[in-house]
Image (spheres, rainbow, N blue to C red):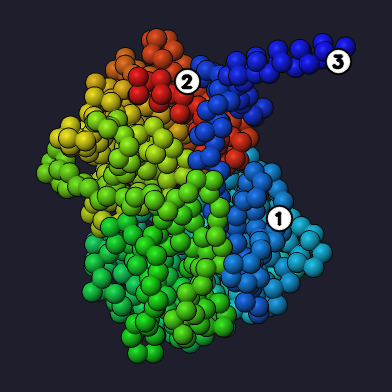
Amino acid sequence: MKRLCQLLALVLLAAWPAFAQNTYVAPPESLIVDGVPKIPAALAETAGRYASFRSASLSDWHPTRHEMLISTRFGETPQLHLVAVPGGARQQLTFFADSVSNGRFHPNGGDYVVFMKDVGGGEWYQLYRYDIKTGEVTLLTDGKSRNLMGPWSSDGDRMAYMSTRRTGKDTDLWVMNPADPKTDHLLTQLNGGGWQPEDWSPDDKKILLLEELSINESYLWLVDTATGQKTELTPRNVTEKVSYGEARFSKDGKGIYVTTDKDSEFHRLAYIDLETKQPTYLTTSIHWDVEAYDLAHDGKLLAFVTDEEGLSVLHVRDTTNGKEMPLPHIPSGVIGGLRWHRNGHDLGFSLNNTRGPGDCYSIDVANEKLERWTTSETAVKTESFPPAELIHWKSFDGKTISGFLYKPPAKFSGKRPVLVVIHGGPEGQSQPTFLGRNNYFLHELGIALIYPNVRGSTGYGKTFSLLDNGMKREDTYKDIHALFDWIAAQPELDSARIAVTGGSYGGHMTLAVSTFYSDRIRCSVDVVGMSNLATFLEHTEAYRRDLRRVEYGDERDSKMREYLEKIAPMNNIEKIKKPMFVIAGKNDPRVPVSESQQIVDALKKVGTPVWLMIANDEGHGYRKKPNQDFQFYAAVEFLQEYLLK
């Protein structure tokens, strides 16, 4: 018997390599896959290392202690954690199936945190209270409407927020004391979905309210917190459309700080006197956008970040004399989550770059000390990852377009295939941040990556950001066509092997390029993209429809409708000749899953190879790690099949 067992063990051992080679990764139960082949387990073992990383982003400072509230992931989704000291352990606070990426301490003592969370990526956010002592979580909103968290009052016991509770479409201004949800009340009824409370006045008698109509048109209002009556602060009847961004009251309440492109191509930081309504511009000498700022609690220091050709530059300015404060060296990258501690000298922020997925830092401006609070793990060593190379090319009309090129390591010889990755928005910008799973394409498959910033992107002036609006939509497709010509002129790149991918509007661009320039590409990967801008506008959620019409055109206008239908990839199916992988989320409120399903069905009818993946528990892009991983593995298989062969 013993001898028989030994022989059986030897037989199984000999067969093990073949057995292992025939094992596959099963898709998560939430995923619907159609046309996607089985994913070998061996691929997951190698590519999976590039999916094994996490990042950390700053949510808030504790109001009385030197501690950070951050968002990071230990399990399947990002959750809120507390970090007590720089480099200290991360204490997880929230435990949900869906991600929690923001939270704010109660300013008076930090005894609880208010945070937002949706279900299944549907973006119908609810507000919750997490009690630090007990760990109990209390739902603060109705559980049905879409709610967006706003600022704390100056007295620290009330919070302003937006809610669609009244109509399901309009975002009204509400106020509550989160410690007592019964205090919740509607303050001001509003029309449309582009409203956001920015700040409370020092005496809490006014709320500063932002109304956004488009990327280049917005207005500021003052709302009386006793009556709910709103008064327009910035003029509406002007010939020039003006954009206003983040806004804060000065400490004395006599004025506000705001970012604006008034009389400028770029968003400058300005101070508006509330009595004269006249702005004083504070960053005129900087010819780039001020993309974020924060005012210290005592009003004495102003920190702001400029976006300079995609990279962040941090400034701290003394509001009493306008002088810049000296700062320590900060690693190159993209800064977010800028936030002063209440002590007035510790400035926290998140930093992301090509060698790191994102971590939390702080600067003590009193002694110019930089401290790193988190060190996020990656399974792959990233120290040798090269920085992005800034590239430029001329488009069809002579305009200069830019982007970032990532070259494969020297171990790959010969001309390299190219994956063009188009950002969403369209009012967005590709920046040299951590590539995440895409590092596998670069470092293991030898695929060069190009992240273009086509016309319509932000960061290059308001004129550039408006070059794709309405009936100019096709011009941005042509920017990618011109990029293909640039690729063809590069001796190290293979213009015969190009793939295109992108998410959201980048997904629409992917579909459009696949339609009108099919002869220039091998294949494409569309992630939650719009296959017809007219049907997209009809079916996107009502609270965002008017905002999108300003960008894409109003589909209710007959001429605009005719144009949108003419350029729709959905209506030009016969022109799509190359294989396509389509990825969508069933609960997507922005780009309905029907936009993906309809083009897949049409491609099947004409016989174009198409793969489909739909997640039943996701919305506008996948957030859950198992879904993200399987999407990644399938994309690797797709590119190996259609780009690399």
Q: Are marks 3 and 1 in contact (CB under 8 Å)?
A: no
Q: Mark 1: which amino acid?
A: Thr
Q: Position of residue 568 (x, y in %)?
A: 33, 27
- Residue of label 1: 94
In this picture, is 393 found above or below 111?
A: above
Residue drawn at x 71%, y 55% is: 94
Seen from this angle, which residue lies furthest right? 1
Number of residues whose C-alpha sits closer than 10 Å to that of mark 3, classed few (under 14), some (14–19) or many (20 or more): few
Q: Is residue 94 left or right of residue 536?
A: right
Residue drawn at x 37%, y 83% is: 325
Q: Is residue 379 left or right of residue 117?
A: left
In this picture, is 644 found above or below 214?
A: above
Q: Quadrant of residue 442?
A: top left
- Residue of label 2: 611
- Residue of label 3: 2
**As rendered, which of 314 and 318 lies closer to the eye?**
314
Q: Position of residue 296 (x, y in %)?
A: 49, 80
Q: Quadrant of residue 281?
A: bottom left
Q: Is residue 307 left or right of residue 70?
A: left
Seen from this angle, which residue lies furthest bottom? 321
Seen from this angle, which residue lies furthest left? 398
Q: Give the mark, 3 or 2, whose residue is nearer the N terminus.
A: 3
Q: Quadrant of residue 335?
A: bottom left
In this picture, is 387 found above or below 499?
A: below
In this picture, is 23 found above or below 30?
A: above
Q: Are marks 1 and 2 in contact (CB under 8 Å)?
A: no
**As rendered, which of 503 and 355 lies closer to the eye?**
355
> Mark 1 and mark 2: span between their CA atoms?
36 Å
Seen from this angle, which residue lies furthest front? 3
Q: Give the mark, 3 or 1, whose residue is nearer the N terminus.
A: 3
